[in-house]
Image (tube, grey):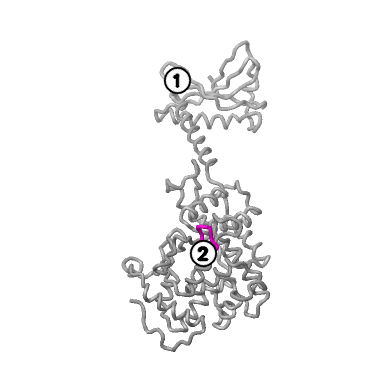
Amino acid sequence: MAKLTPNKITGLLKKSSAYYASDDNGSKGMGRLCVKVYPSGSKRFVFRYFAGAKANFILIGNVPNDGGKTTDKVLGISLAGAREKAKEFGAMLQRGDDPRLELEIINHEKENKVKLEAQKGSIEQLFTSYTAQMEKDGKRTFKAVFDALEKEVYPFIAPATKAKDVSKDDLILILAHMIKRGANTQSNRVRSYLMAAFNYGLAHDNDPANYIGNAKFGLLFNPVSAIPKQKSAERIGEHFLTISEVKQLLCDLENEFIRFNMGSHIRNLIILCFYTGGQRPYELASSKWSSVNFESKTLLVTADISKNKRPHLIPLTDSAMTILTNQQANSTSDFIFPHRFSEVQHINLDSLSKAISRYRDKSDIRSFIPRDIRRTCKTLMGELGISKSIRDRLQNHALQDVSSKHYDRYEYMPEKLRALEIWERNLNDVATTSNVLSFGAK
């Protein structure tokens, strides 16, 4: 038995039955590289070894037409390449392992790896799962977040792209196009949505409650982390109306609503926002009549609609009660402020924004947006001497001090009512004194 060469392999002639020509590797117990010659004349490299008295064969690859001088990606593997594979199998035999079984294990692991790779979650699955978790957590903005991600990301990154394959440069390109078209502030928002979505994906794989079928995201880091915010685009809101502008607004809503093309639900919602000390419009708009206690003169913002997920009890002044009484007079809906076309839904906040926009176009007061109402109330109540602590509690801010978070469950109803009554008198032009409020938080 001698070593095989390309010329010798080329000279192997076909016979009526298949036969083997062995390569002498000069060692025992490590199997042999062989060329199997078929009756058709085709040739293949195989590895032959014995398990007990039984000969076993492992296919290595086809022999090229040149007898194995070079590797041909289509026609076969070279003689040198075949010897390397035979050497690997021989090493397994020396360790006491069966090459066929070891090869099955290796191939099985490869298949699993390919399968796991195919199951890695796409960017679309990441966005869907993240916003679904937002909805589950009661975040009202979940749909707006998903819509923004879908609008800005998919034109640059295909939805089927694996989340783990999305790079920092991909995301920079998206944000750069937003900045180029002048949407600096929105670019910061989309950046924050992306940051939160990828952070969710990082934690997702270890949380059994968040699986999407069998998919995992396989993220190793957050690609948004290295992308800075556009600091020039983020300015702290400073605009608020003066007391004279507020009074003009309330007067217009009471007397000139036809000129401003505003329905009664919208007008009453805006007025109630002011007389309750700047409550969040959504929380009032989505409240139901079951939350109003006309006897005790209170309105409960329930935990399910509260931004900080804590119930918020609001005392109602006579002016606020009048608004609610008028609103209830013609109501057949469960909602205090029902949708214009469906009583089983509450009023859409887009309607509020559009109504205020129409008002701005026809009024003489400075431009403002719905969010400015809350800031206006907070600021003007402060000018009346109402303590920040009471103003914070009136507006149901999430207080972060240990006492408020874990121990203080006092509702501050008398203090909040006194503050709203002083605020009401100011709105209604009743004279107030400079020392109207001397109390603080308990």
Q: Which residue is mark 2?
A: 328
Q: Nearer the viewer, residue 86 or 208?
A: 208
The amino acid type of the residue labelled 2 equals Gln
Q: Is residue 122 above or below residue 298?
A: above
Whether residue 282 appears in magenta in the rendering, the answer is no
- Segment tinted magenta in the rendering: 329-335
Q: Position of residue 72 (x, y in %)?
A: 65, 32
Label 1, secondary structure: give it: strand
Q: Position of residue 308 (x, y in %)?
A: 44, 63
Label 2, secondary structure: give it: helix
Most extreme residue toward the left is: 407
User: Residue at coordinates 46% horizontally, 31% vertically from top-left?
Assistant: 105
Q: Position of residue 88 (x, y in %)?
A: 49, 32
Q: Is residue 26 above or below residue 184?
A: above
Q: Which residue is mark 1?
A: 50
Q: Nearer the viewer, residue 279 or 261?
A: 261
The amino acid type of the residue labelled 1 equals Phe
